[in-house]
Image (cartoon, rainbow, N blue to C red):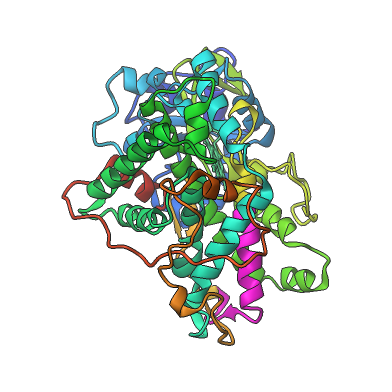
Amino acid sequence: MTSSSPDRTRTTSPSGPPPECPAHAGAGSTDGLARLFGPEAAADPMGMYERLRAEHGPVAPVLLDGDLPAWLVVGYREILEVAGTPGRFSRDSRTWRWFKEGKVPPDSPLLPMIAWQPVCLFLDGAERDRLRTAVTDSLSHFHHQGIRRHIIRFAHQLTDEFSERGKADLVAEYTEQLPMLVLTQLLGMPDEFGPRLVAASRDMVAGTETSVASNEFIVETLADLVRRKRKDLGQDIASWLIEHPSGLTDEEVWNHLRVILIAANETTVNLLKSTLRMVLTDPRCHASLAGGQMVLPDVVEHVLWTEPPLMTIPGRWAAVDTEIGGQKVEAGDMLLLGLAAGNHDPAARPDPSAPLYGNRGHLAFSSGPQECPGQNIGRAIADTGIDTLLARLPDARLSIPETDLRWVSGWMTRHLTSLPVTFTPGPRHFSASDDGAAGTVPGPGAPSDARDAAAPGSGPAADAPLPPVPPYPSAPPPRSRRSWWGSLRAWLRG
Ligand code: HEM
């Protein structure tokens, strides 16, 4: 424990925490602790993490929404320890003391992230291994070349929407669209579902009265996909989950497809935004990209160190009374992994200005047995998506001063709201008459030889001419309540 505060020193006494310690005393006992949901955190999350590190050391007591106490792990080594020892730090949210004591209100904004569900995210032991193996095996079927082909096609399709205009908002028109379009292909959906899922998820992000309908649309779409894939398997995540020797039920399959969508989309959108901003605004990066000193994958890795798409993740609960980072943690305490703070831990990175090119030692994908299984897909979307965009708009530049860029922070993420650029207008990649053409990557109804031709790694070369995707269909019908999914995404995005 490195705290200089006498009170904090007492909270970390090896003989156990004093009764007034908020992490143990009870919900509502705030004791001047930092609030992860407060205005201070939203205004300057990194500043808050550093203050916590200075005051408490690598593991700091914090307050969540409703002043529910938890521990925020800000030390690099301690994050590895928590993530790497599931026997001490469980994924099972049902063990949280405040759940057991009925202190978490039914409308708590924490629930979307931590309410227990029967998916690998919330399980330990053999059952978790059964489901996690199915997910990791299914994701690892893809070959880089096959994924690149989808990314390039959608990247061109999106760029066509603004290339003749000479200006665009690359957040709304590019980075927020591309990952979901690619993901729907990987999941095994027909093309027309990509734009619909983007529309549905954006609707939920807005937290509107139609968000319940949007959630239902996504669940029904995934459940329907599983039903159809059961009859006609393909080369996609849905089919590989169905076929997996772990023997998932239909409900387990679509629940995990939903987990993949949640885990993959928002994170990859944020990675694309931050990397693109760096490419557009950082002169060293610009110069080195042009000069060949720093390739785009290095920039992506640099961003994963400096602005990880998820700053903080919840999801570990002490399984036993234990000690970490000098703090006495009791069974049932909740721990959050401060991935951004860990990446900036001076104990791990004494010289923050030292080049990080190619160094993959960051915590952006977490670590240990739960480490993100889709990280190479996320990297590929960011890398190839930006590469393709810059090839189309080589002279793109910010159309506002960099200081006018705006971020929105939640307790888990911090992301850009817009990235307006200007560039020399250029021609479309697909001719306008191609719009709505049916000759896209074949969907579930297509003959299996056509599907096989589109299988990852077995399709045309990545630079082969690719057909466009159809225009956006209309959004789902309006309803009135906010959904679990909607709350989750709204919460993730601040
Ligand atoms: C570049 C963007 C991405 C980042 C920064 C990221 C980061 C993370 C993090 C921090 C976790 C939590 C690990 C833990 O609890 O210790 C996670 C879990 C997960 N991610 Fe990613 N992710 C990204 C992209 C993706 C993609 C593209 C996919 C799938 C195609 C994916 C699938 C998953 C899944 C299924 C989990 C849950 C794993 C489990 O609980 O066992 N992620 N990700």
Q: Is residue 399 above or below residue 179?
A: below
State left or right for residue 193 relative to residue 374.
left
Q: Is residue 133 visible?
A: yes
Q: Is residue 11 above or below residue 31?
A: above
Choose between 432 and 76: the one closer to the eye.
432
State left or right for residue 192 relative to residue 452.
left
Residue 113, given in percent of the width and then of the height, sits at: 39, 36
Residue sitting at 70 percent across and 52 percent down?
A: 301
Residue 296, given in percent of the width and then of the height, sits at: 72, 61
Residue at the extreme left:
480
- The quarter holding residue 199 reads bottom left
Choose between 442 and 23: the one closer to the eye.
442
For the image, the number of numbered tags is 0
Residue sitting at 62 percent across and 76 percent down?
A: 392
Instruction: Locate the N terminus by quadrant.
Output: top right
Q: For the stretch drawn in magenta, what is the main secondary structure?
A: helix
Residue 424, given in percent of the width and then of the height, sits at: 59, 87
Q: Is residue 71 visible?
A: no
Residue sitting at 73 percent across and 44 percent down?
A: 360
Residue 283, given in percent of the width and then of the height, sits at: 72, 74
Residue sitting at 40 percent across and 27 percent down?
A: 252
Magenta segment: does it hold 394? yes
Magenta segment: does it hold 232? no
The magenta-colored residue range is 380-402
Which quadrant contains ligand 1? top right
Q: Is residue 294 above or below residue 435?
A: above
